[in-house]
Amino acid sequence: MSTRERKDKHIRKLTRLGGSLVVSIPVEYVDTLKWREKQKVVVKRSGKKLVITDWKE
């Protein structure tokens, strides 16, 4: 693996999908949080940041 690949490992691009924009989440983060495909999450804005948390009923 080159230095550039390691440096940019967690940089993602926004991609248009229908009428929305999507961003992929690094698999290491998903594994650590024990999230799974199709799991519901909550996206909140906090200043200039987005915070993604597990959805609780």
Image (spheres, rainbow, N blue to C red):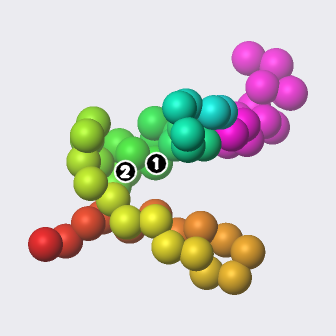
Residue in the image at 26% along x and 66% along y: 55
Q: Label 1 belongs to which residue?
A: 29
**Nearer-the-camera pick, 17 or 45:** 17
Q: Label 2 belongs to which residue?
A: 32
Please provide percent x and percent y for residue 9.
Answer: 70, 35
Compute the Cα span from label 2 to label 1: 5 Å
The quarter of the displayed image where residue 11 is located: top right
Residue in the image at 55% along x and 31% along y: 17
Residue in the image at 59% along x and 67% along y: 50
* Mark 2, secondary structure of its residue: helix
Please provide percent x and percent y for residue 38.
Answer: 25, 40
Tell me if label 2 and label 1 are in contact, CB under 8 Å: yes
The type of residue carrying mark 2 is: Thr
Q: Is residue 46 above or below residue 36?
A: below
Please provide percent x and percent y for residue 18.
Answer: 53, 32
How crowded is the residue under tag 2: few (<14 C-alpha within 10 Å), some, or many (20+)? few
Magenta span covers which residues? 1-14
Secondary structure, magenta segment, majority class: loop
Going by the picture, which residue comes out furthest to the bottom? 47
Residue 23: within the magenta?
A: no
Residue 10: within the magenta?
A: yes
* Mark 1, secondary structure of its residue: helix
Going by the picture, which residue comes out furthest to the left? 57
Q: Quadrant of the N terminus?
A: top right
Give the side of residue 11 with respect to residue 24, left or right. Answer: right
